[in-house]
Amino acid sequence: MLDDLEKFTKLKRRTRGAINIDPLQRGGILTPEAKEAVLEWADGYSICDFCTGAMDKIQNPPIKSFVHDALPEFLDIDEVRITHGAREGIFAAMHALCERGSCVVADGNAHYTTILAAELAGLKVEQTPVGGEPEYKVDPQGYNKTIEDVRSRGEKVDLAVLTYPDGNYGNLVDAKKVAQICHDLDVDLLLNGAYSVGRMDLSARDLGVDVIVGSGHKSMASCGPIGVLGATEECAKTIFRRSKLVPDKELELLGCTLRGAGILSMMASFPHVVERTKLWDDEVEKARWFASQIEPFGILLQGERPHNHDLMFFKSEVLYEISKTARKGRYFLYRELKKRKIFGIKPGLTRQFKLSTYLLSREDLQTVVDGLEEIIASYTRA
Amino acid sequence: MLDDLEKFTKLKRRTRGAINIDPLQRGGILTPEAKEAVLEWADGYSICDFCTGAMDKIQNPPIKSFVHDALPEFLDIDEVRITHGAREGIFAAMHALCERGSCVVADGNAHYTTILAAELAGLKVEQTPVGGEPEYKVDPQGYNKTIEDVRSRGEKVDLAVLTYPDGNYGNLVDAKKVAQICHDLDVDLLLNGAYSVGRMDLSARDLGVDVIVGSGHKSMASCGPIGVLGATEECAKTIFRRSKLVPDKELELLGCTLRGAGILSMMASFPHVVERTKLWDDEVEKARWFASQIEPFGILLQGERPHNHDLMFFKSEVLYEISKTARKGRYFLYRELKKRKIFGIKPGLTRQFKLSTYLLSREDLQTVVDGLEEIIASYTRA
């Protein structure tokens, strides 16, 4: 048996060369430097040639300086470690900081992985209210109410989480205000920056958050899985505590996390990532422009207005109506976009979908605008 | 601030082109096919172009068939999932299968990550006895005694772990016998195959183990971090249970684990990996030959005899004596080997060290033998 194994080799990515508007993928496209790094360090445990006991202490290549100097400065927080991704960072923080059976309060727009992480850590989750359509806003005061509610039924709140921005609407809640509210209630705040760390210029210290996670493959031009987990000195003491049984190893991340190319790809992309966060305002500007171009076709931006992130959620009754009679039904949009070498809206979606304009040129975005206009016009005529 | 970031880019691996005898790295060297795959799929979330809700269900590229058909057949076990590595697989299994506060019984030679995983999962660990030097053998009967001992003090044993082979001496304990003993005592057995899955032709079913973990970056020619976690149907029900709060996601692995090139590198190397496991006897033969060549110099193989694995632990009073007076002291061996383009014995070690002969040619191994002979001769003369 175990025949026909060649089908697992020489696989090409079908979307190569296309305009990719998938929010999940826009911030994870590697720089040329990162691609070189991946090839150079692709072998298993390649970074461990001169290991001195833990991944974050390796000096050649200069991982130690990256993890202990550059990343803390970049996130503006005391301590940082490398994780397998944002969700794994959230789990580590929850598992370390929260007592089993206690409750985590998360924003109503939290990513599903926040819920999974809490469940896996043996915690309950209570979410803050979300405002109605079309903005679906989370009011910072919701944390006040939700924390009090949980407490009033006799339960403990051990951590709050804010998804910044959320992965559905790209809404940016006032994190500073949330942090204040949480701290006034003596609750630490974790910021899920999967869509902001590596895109936006942000400071955990200025925002006042106690823990921050970021995603290398989502927003730091890295070959995943890889993420960052930053913490204030006080939280770091608990999250990055050493094992009692193997005293030279940090327990929560099982000793070492990354054992290969991913960390070198993050390092190689880092100068570019630092630079691009300074150009964030242009990205926001471009996102707003794009939305303004397609709204007249009946593709309507949801989430905050004015919008403050490249991740955007749209609703379109026009496209939905077309899908009811189009050949291929609800797959018509995917196929029409594919014809125009545009990928990233999930196959089968027409009535509502997410997309991102991040780091796409105005020319490419114009192609998307023109494509959508053409598609709607041609089906509406017919 | 955040200046001088260029030092994180264009980093070359210094050991490239050398003969690498590091046991950690021998089995993780990528095939040419895997290197191609890594480049093609290096971008973050690249494998998610046609996601249908979970990584292991993706059909294009054919991850679903790899995870649900090829890997279960390869490991000869009911269900398999992809993890971030062997240690993460061990943690997942322990966390899912064991009640907090209960005890895990592991072999006395278990890897430190087994201890960390148990500690992180809130479990106690009791290890079986290890025989004396030079073989440091673990007797399967030790499981009997250790499980009974733990129970006699009123504690619960929820899982047993066997490291196969252990990462220190490369000893292969009779796993079938251990499984029988554990099952007679109604304890499930997890096999840590970080150094065997991808090297040796093995069948979880034949060995009778309930859970098996393997490491992609250690033994499956993969770009890490990546591992495999296999389980019998019964254990899989618990380990791969779905979330109660997000019902379409598997809880223990937080939804999806790998979100990038690693899984494609494992797939691309898989035909080679399957083939190489059939040539395992030759690798054992070569390891024994190598040991027989250097023992006359006073570099003495520890662990089982005859030895059954490419991972070998040596003790050498000769090299230790030299280090006492050599220029550079205990770093002399590292430097002398480096001169000869041989890497993989940790800098500073002389009295005892590990190495591996895995997939090295006889010619390269002869170079290592000759190098060691020369080094000892030159320092002994002086």
Image (spheres, coloured by chain):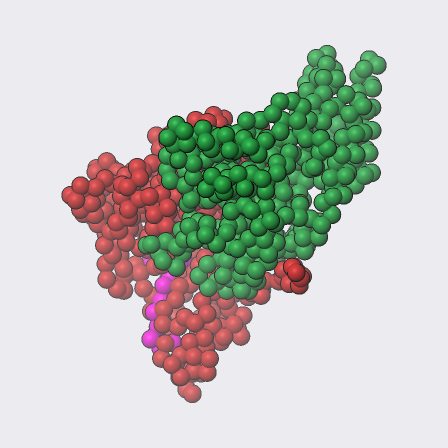
Chain colours: A green, B red
Residue B219, position as x, y percentages in the image: 46, 50
User: Residue A109, relative to residue A351: is it above or below?
Assistant: below
User: Residue A301, relative to residue A231: is it above or below?
Assistant: above
Let me know if residue A40 appears in the view: yes
User: Residue A107, relative to residue B337: is it above or below?
Assistant: above
Magenta range is B305-319
* Rendered-image quadrant of the C terminus of chain A: top right
Residue A141, position as x, y percentages in the image: 55, 32
Q: Residue at x 72, y 17 (%)?
A: A317
Residue A185, position as x, y percentages in the image: 47, 39
User: Residue A96, relative to residue A326: is it above or below?
Assistant: below
Task: Depth check: give the residue in front, B142 or B297.
Answer: B142
- Residue projecting furthest to the bottom: B382
Q: How many marks?
A: 0
Corner quadrant of residue B180: top left
Residue B312 among those drawn in magenta = yes
Residue A90, position as x, y percentages in the image: 49, 41
Report whether B135 appears left or right of A201: left
